């Protein structure tokens, strides 16, 4: 029976398509830095190890990887990464060659697997001038969609949207699996308002909490094909909190890099109680993984991996792998900057 099951699993991949997946210098660190960081999230790992899907298969692909022992995972970094990319390409026809793109695609496809064959209402369907009514209807819809499902329980925080529309304020809600922070836009806004802090080396710093606040500041939007002002806020959070740090922005042919001028400042522990509205939520978090990207323009002669994931073990100790060798401690190397931060909720 085991042989039959294994052959079914292997038949889910087109070997020709796997072999055709190529990246520069065979550096798949933008993929395995992500799944290695997800693997150490114990509740998520246990969820995936019991996973079985008949469509899309991102969950099954992670299941195959997570079942491997440490030596097998290290020996299969490229093939495991190709399988992740294969699943993304089957749905998206392309893949982003950054860690932030890969983790977003993995989480988005896992969510899609949970909803396969189910009707998903638009969050605007529950819009109401009474936010409690909008909340109740949206949460009930979500509960029916994700019944008996750990993915939603582990990753889904809830955003409240306040929309000023036709001189009325209405409210809608939406779930999120990660929070994107656009550091170039945030830096420009803070700089224009004279609110940038410079450290003793005259380098501008953006605090993670301030970045969250600015990302959710009011902005122009469109609602029902009409101009509106929208403000999102965190209503409640989930056991895992993932921040995607976008440090680059392209306008026409001009590329702006925040990491060339400043740095993001964050704590190993964060408390976002005063940013999340639901008072009963556990809003204290501890860092689990930091995924850093190499600034390739400044490291042309550096042959090391473009991405490194600095993880935290069960004892609270940092470690990372370099040339397949485990090194204890915090990864500090000139020319690398943060791209993904993964936090897990602290137990009371």
Image (tube, helix red, strand yellow):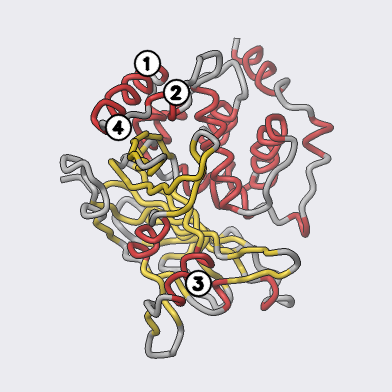
Q: Position of residue 187 (x, y in %)?
A: 47, 71
The CA span between labels 4 and 3 is: 33 Å
- Is 296 rendered above or below residue 158? below
Viewer-proximal residue, 229 or 313? 229
| Residue wearing tag 3 | 188
Q: Position of residue 339 (x, y in %)?
A: 52, 60
| Residue wearing tag 4 | 129
What element does badge 1 sit on? helix
The CA span between labels 3 and 1 is: 42 Å
**Image quarter hosting the N terminus:** top right
Which residue is outermost to the front? 167
- Is 219 rendered above or below residue 167? below
| Residue wearing tag 2 | 50
Numbered badge on residue 144: 1
Disc 4 and disc 3 in contact, CB within 8 angstroms: no
**Image quarter hosting the C terminus:** top left
- Is 251 rendered above or below residue 101? below
The CA span between labels 4 and 2 is: 42 Å
Disc 1 and disc 2 in contact, CB within 8 angstroms: no
Viewer-proximal residue, 133 or 58? 133
Quarter assignment of residue 156: top left
Disc 4 and disc 1 in contact, CB within 8 angstroms: no
């Amino acid at each position: 029976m085991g042989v039959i099951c294994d052959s079914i699993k292997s038949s889910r991949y087109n070997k020709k398509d796997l072999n055709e997946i190529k990246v520069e210098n065979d550096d798949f660190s933008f993929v395995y830095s992500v799944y290695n960081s997800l693997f150490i999230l114990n509740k998520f790992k246990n969820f995936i190890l019991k996973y079985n899907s008949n469509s899309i298969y991102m969950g099954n692909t992670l299941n195959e990887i997570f079942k491997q022992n440490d030596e097998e995972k290290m020996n299969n970094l490229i093939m495991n990464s190709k399988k992740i990319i294969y699943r993304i390409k089957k749905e998206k026809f392309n893949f982003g060659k950054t860690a932030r793109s890969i983790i977003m695609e993995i989480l988005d496809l896992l969510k899609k697997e949970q909803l396969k064959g189910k009707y998903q209402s638009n969050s605007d369907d529950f819009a109401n001038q009474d936010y409690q009514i909008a909340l109740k209807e949206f949460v009930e819809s979500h509960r029916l969609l994700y019944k008996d499902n750990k993915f939603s329980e582990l990753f889904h925080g809830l955003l409240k949207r306040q929309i000023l529309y036709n001189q009325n304020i209405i409210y809608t809600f939406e779930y999120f699996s990660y929070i994107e922070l656009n550091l170039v836009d945030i830096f420009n806004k803070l700089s224009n308002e004279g609110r940038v802090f410079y450290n003793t080396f005259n380098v501008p710093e953006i605090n993670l909490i301030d970045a969250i606040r600015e990302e959710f500041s009011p902005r122009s939007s469109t609602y029902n094909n009409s101009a509106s002002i929208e403000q999102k806020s965190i209503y409640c959070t989930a056991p895992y909190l993932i921040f995607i740090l976008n440090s680059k922005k392209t306008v026409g042919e001009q590329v702006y890099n925040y990491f060339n001028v400043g740095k993001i400042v964050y704590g190993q522990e964060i408390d976002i109680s005063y940013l999340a509205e639901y008072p009963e939520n556990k809003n204290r978090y501890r860092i689990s993984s930091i995924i850093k990207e190499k600034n390739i323009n400044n490291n042309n002669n550096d042959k090391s991996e473009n991405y490194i994931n600095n993880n935290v073990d069960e004892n609270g100790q940092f470690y990372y792998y370099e040339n397949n060798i485990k090194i204890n401690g915090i990864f500090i190397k000139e020319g690398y900057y943060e791209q993904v931060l993964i936090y897990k909720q602290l137990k009371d």
